[in-house]
Amino acid sequence: MRKGLRDLVGGVGDGEPSSSSKRKNVYPPIEAFWLPPAEAAPVEAKGSRGLSSKLLQPLKFRRSSEKRRSLKMAMEGKHDPKEEEAVDALREMLFLDCQLPPKFNDYHTLLRFLRMRDFDRPAAKEMFLKFIKWREEFRTDAISKEFKFEEREEVKKCYPHGFHGVDRYGRPIYIERLGMVDLNTLLQVTTLERFVKYHVSEQEKTLSIRYPACSIQAKKHIASTTSILDVGGVGMANFSKPARYLFTEIQKIDSNYYPETLHQLFIINAGSGFKILWKALSAFLDARTLAKIHVFGHNYVQELRVIIDPSNLPSFLGGNCVCSEYGGCLSSDRGPWNNPDILALLQQVISSADEACDYDEEESGLASEDAWLDNRKIQALEEALAETKTKIEALETALEDTKVILREVTQYIDDLRT
């Protein structure tokens, strides 16, 4: 469950629980700077099946560092100068306090936290440090590498959800069929704690593999998800105590540690009962969240096809895909992140980035040593200056005393003459 009902429980969207009195600025999509006003050029309809030969061939047969840099630049995207200035300032704040791990010294990571806190740098810094602390305590890196969710397929039978294809811009699509959730069965095949770990591992995969793979296929920076929440058949059973705990825990994790990753949420098959609930919920949401959420009844297909090619839409959502070879679309995890050619390119970029990071760390170590020596020199000069200043003040005091004595002697001599 990445961006589904958890967006409607305990605070919708990215960030802390919001209220009508807590307004947040509305920003354009995190990928949108300097792009055409429209949702950009459509991505190849076949999703993970194809990749433009213009991109593949030069990089497949001419794996030069120049080509890798070119690909990395396309994935990085262009930066808004004002946002870049804010990121640099936050980076400096963290670096000077020795609180910026090299792994997260990343423009887009820092930008997410700044956006989440409306570019309030001290607040963004505080949020970022809580994120680092949580990763250490939750052992997030270990979960990404070691956690095995063997019950995945059984879980998906009673909780239909998953990634499937990309939208017309190139963002990954996440789908959740909330009305078909059987929580009792879910708790028989897994535990709430294991499901939360599974969710975190999926979040890590999205940041480290899905977004970069989508960026390679789209040839531009991709950093958010288009989500579809099917609420057809939702009843009070979906809001039981275990369900509320699970959704609230996941919402807290996503809000605090994976901010600004939702592009749009499409709620479909909303009946009259849900629409009444939504009307009450929306009164407590800020403008930023409301701008991302779109609620439709049963006539939603054309709306989805505006942003998603039918080949990337499952048949149960009005698309053309069935993924029969995988047992259904929500079991396929279909997308560019499973394309071997794209993964090979991604590995090249990661390898070159690691080499650059090692070099930067070495240079950073030398720079830190030089900085330490410079600081010691400055400290010694300041100490010497302070000592000299004290001596000068003592001399000035002695000089004033001498002047007083001379005046008294002069007066005494004048008295003797008279």
Image (cartoon, rainbow, N blue to C red):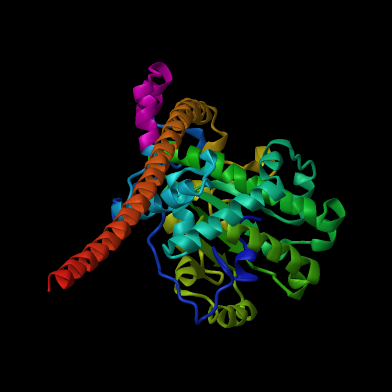
Mark yes or no: residue 315 visible: no
Quarter of the N terminus within the rendering: bottom right
Q: Quadrant of residue 59?
A: top left
Regarding residue 158, the answer to whether it shows in the image is: yes
Residue at 55 percent of width and 40 percent of height: 208
The image position of residue 115, as x and y in percent, is: 44, 60
Q: Residue furthest top?
A: 61
Residue drawn at x 42%, y 58% as measured from the top left: 306
Instruction: Identify the residue at image location x=64%, y=71%.
Output: 10
Residue 253 drawn at (x, y percent): 64, 58
User: Within the image, what quadrant is residue 148 found in?
Assistant: top right
Q: Single out the residue that lies furthest toward the right.
A: 188
Number of numbered discs visible in the structure rendering = 0
In the rendered image, residue 68 lying in the magenta stretch gets the answer yes
Q: Is residue 199 above or below residue 278?
A: above
Query: In the depicted view, which residue is nearer to us: 124 or 279?
Result: 124
- 72 left or right, relative to 154: left
Where 226 falls versus 60 (above or below)?
below
Instruction: Tell me if residue 169 comes above or below residue 273 in the rendering.
Output: above
Magenta stretch prevailing secondary structure: helix
Question: In the image, which residues are magenta?
Answer: 53-73
Front residue of 164 and 404: 404
**Identity of the residue drawn at 38% across and 19% down:** 64
Which quarter of the rendering shows the C terminus?
bottom left
Position of 144 with respect to 193 (left or right) is left
Q: Report if residue 220 lies within the magenta region.
A: no
Q: Is residue 71 above or below residue 415?
A: above
Q: Nearer the viewer, residue 250 or 291?
A: 250
Residue 299 in the image: x percent, y percent?
52, 68
Q: Position of residue 29 (x, y in %)?
A: 40, 57
